[in-house]
Image (tube, rainbow, N blue to C red):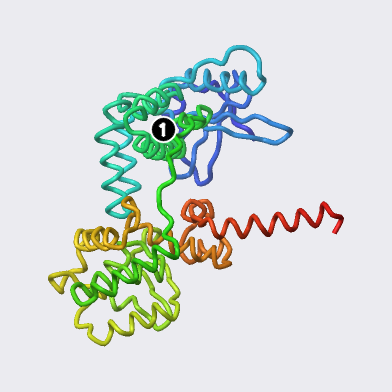
Amino acid sequence: MTERARLTDALALAARPREREYAIHDTALQGFMLRVQSNGARSWVFRFRRDGKARRVTLGRPDAVKADRARTAALAFLAQEKGGGSPVPLPASGPTLAKFAAEYVERRSPSWKPSTLAATMSYLDSAILPAVGHLRVGSAVRADIARFFHEYGRRKPGGANRSHEILRTMFDRAIAWGHRPEAAGNPCKGIVRYKRPPRGRLLGADDLAKLGAVLCQREDDNPVCVAAVRLLLLTGCRPGEIRRLRWSEVKPDRLTLIDAKTGPRHVLLGGAARELLDGLAGTASGEWVFPGRDEDEPLDKNDLYGFWIKARDAAGIVADARLHDLRHAHASHAVMNGESLHVAGRLLGHRRASTTNRYVHLDDATLGEAAERVALAVGRKLRGG
């Protein structure tokens, strides 16, 4: 039997959990109800039908949203669904964004890498919270976030984009955890991020030949960095993955990376990569494939990057070519040699094809050959062939 009552704050606070979840329906507004879960969690809920299907939105928790305000929110949502009248503003509710950020980091950070935690805290402390930390997560609207986004973006468009990602995820969690009414939606939705010029340079066949010659010249002076740069090109790994590569991760046909950017992954090795690693194994004496000045530590980031700058300049490669562009080169030459974008992405360990697409650069010769093939095919069609 359906339980019905005039929903009030007192009733919501007095409701006790039972063995199974149950709901108390409001006698004043059809579809408005108090949901009580078996673990004691309570929430205001509004049920309705859209296109003949039952739908449900959560409007907040009784300890954060008063009954009358939740009922007003349900009416506002109903007005929006029916497309009539002016929507009633959703009630202000939930903790401030600054307070919620502490909860968000505490609950989410155990699954993050240290670098992710450091970057998130940096953006929160330096940009996000000073500007919008006073907002209530239950009442923030798109205009609030857009104002911050565009003011920050005038100075640092890349920082604005990253802050948008953090805020979007935070508001998703605020809805899921009952701090923000589901009917209010995510205020980051609909804000168009800044388009950034594509980063990365294509290292073509001539560039690789000149780089190879420089590496041969410097092999006796700095064999560790020379081998690291070669393995970057041969595997498409990230610089940090190669710098911190352990011998325990090197198998006969693959690298079994334990701490890659996207989690553990396998990198299959071609013949040239296997030959390089076999040569290094003959003189290995410690844990690291590429040891630093102190053999108990991996190759230092600054040492590898410093070597790359000097090798790049000596080879006459364009001055803004980055060490990470060796990874781009691996993907680009895979595609130019006939591999699909999907295969190139799998080689790099990408989760999304769109990421691989940003990595791949095609040289003029490859594009010219493609243009010639397309022109020949179209020409045959025009001739009725």
Query: In which quadrant will I find the C terminus?
Result: bottom right
**Quick one: 72 or 279, which is closer to the camera?**
279
Which residue is pictured at 58% across the width and 26% down the height? 32
Q: Position of residue 199 (x, y in %)?
A: 40, 48
Q: Position of residue 286 (x, y in %)?
A: 20, 79
* In this picture, residue 212 sits left or right of residue 285: right
Specify whether residue 147 is in view: yes
Q: What element carries label 1?
A: loop
Examine the image and state in which quarter residue 123 appears: top left
Q: Position of residue 112 (x, y in %)?
A: 33, 53
View extreme (right): residue:
384
**Quick one: 227 or 120, which is closer to the camera?**
227
View extreme (top): residue:
85
Examine the image and state in which quarter residue 14 appears: top left
**Quick one: 83 or 74, which is closer to the camera?**
83
Q: Position of residue 42 (x, y in %)?
A: 46, 35
* In this picture, residue 244 sits left or right of residue 88: left
Q: Is residue 335 above or below residue 173?
A: below
Which residue is pictured at 40% across the width and 26% down the height? 145
View extreme (bottom): residue:
282
Assess disc 1: are there few (<14), some (14-19) or many (≥20) residues with their C-alpha within 10 Å of its C-alpha. many
Residue for badge 1: 179
Specify whether residue 16 is in view: no
Q: Is residue 192 above or below residue 311?
A: above
